[in-house]
Amino acid sequence: RAAAARSHDLAGRTVLVTAGGTREPLDPVRFLGNRSSGRQGVAIAARAAARGADVTLVAANLEVGVPDGVHVVEVSTAAQMAETCAEIAPRREVIIMAAAVADYRPDRVSDSKIKKEQSGDELTIAFTKNPDILRDLSAARVDGQIIVGFAAETAADDDELLELGRAKIARKGCDYLAVNRVGWHEGFQRDENSVVILAADGDVVRRHEGDKMSVADAILDVVAG
Ligand code: CTP
Ligand code: CA
């Protein structure tokens, strides 16, 4: 889509974007986190706003600044993100879940710092599953709402990537899934990204490679179309 056509194609649309990586506390000074910087989600929020949308960004521990002209709600844990999204989502037409959400959280959070003296040579931590925000929002989808999920997969090749993506979108029940390959040296903390966008039936609707702003536009093109 040409720049001119994109300039106002999301005018008046309400968009919820999640970005960043959740952190699950272990004790007052430690957390379990992930390598998501928030760049891709922030780029989506920025481009959606530039294309005229009314954007709310649910931001978890961003390593980058937030864009101008976007409403920001800061959260840290998956539970906080779930609660915030459940409250806001019913009033949004488009939902794009770019955040990396912790699948599990420690069973219990220690009120005081965990000490080596008490833990000994091996420390075992029990975890509980977090709510699946994307699946829950998809199950509660209101009429006409478009829900986009992300999947970062460590796949050996394109075939395996598509296979993992198709299984995931079927499990999640969202409308589109933006799938990208990650590894020790791919995907995170960088500006380049490469995505395959799948529709609910598993069809590839778009492939795109480029900086995170252009990936954002590619995803928004699918949503706007
Ligand atoms: N997601 C979510 N809530 C969770 C976990 C993930 O909403 N508790 C969302 C992410 O924001 C992303 C999508 O689901 O949009 C896919 O996340 P991913 O971690 O790839 O999926 P999982 O179902 O957690 O599968 P996996 O076992 O591969 O981590
Ligand atoms: Ca996960």
Image: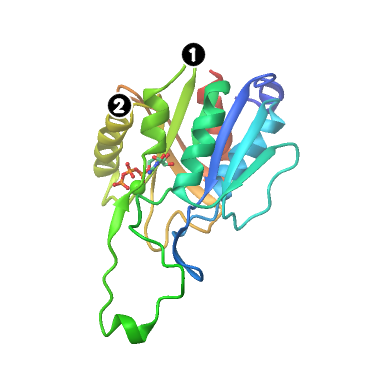
Residue 197 visible at all? no
**Where does residue 117 sit, x and y in percent of width and height?**
35, 87
Residue 139 in which image quadrant: top left
From the top left corner, tell me how far across and down residue 97 is, in percent.
48, 37
Name which residue lies at 29% across and 36% down: 168
- The residue drawn where x is 26% and y is 85% is 121
Under mark 2, the amino acid is Gly
Q: Which mark is residue 167?
A: none
Q: Nearer the viewer, residue 44 or 77?
A: 77
| Circle 2 residue | 202
Residue situated furthest front in the rendering: 111
Q: Residue at x 49, y 31 (%)?
A: 86
Amino acid at dot 1: Gly
- In the picture as drawn, the residue positioned furthest to the top comes out as 143
Q: Nearer the viewer, residue 40 or 106?
A: 106
Q: Residues within 10 Å of mark 1 (few under 14, many from 20)?
A: few
- In the image, is residue 71 above or below residue 28? above
Indicate the secondary structure of the residue bearing disc 2: loop
Q: Quadrant where the N terminus lies?
A: top right
Quarter residue 183 falls in: bottom left
Q: Residue furthest right?
A: 68
Q: Tell me: 27 left or right of 108.
A: right
Picture layout, residue 200 above or below residue 67: above
On the picture, is 152 further left or further right than 191?
left
Give the residue displayed 28% in from the left and 29% down from the top.
170
Residue at label 1? 144
Q: Is there any visible trace of residue 11 in the rendered image?
A: yes
Residue 98 horizontal side relative to residue 7, left or right = left
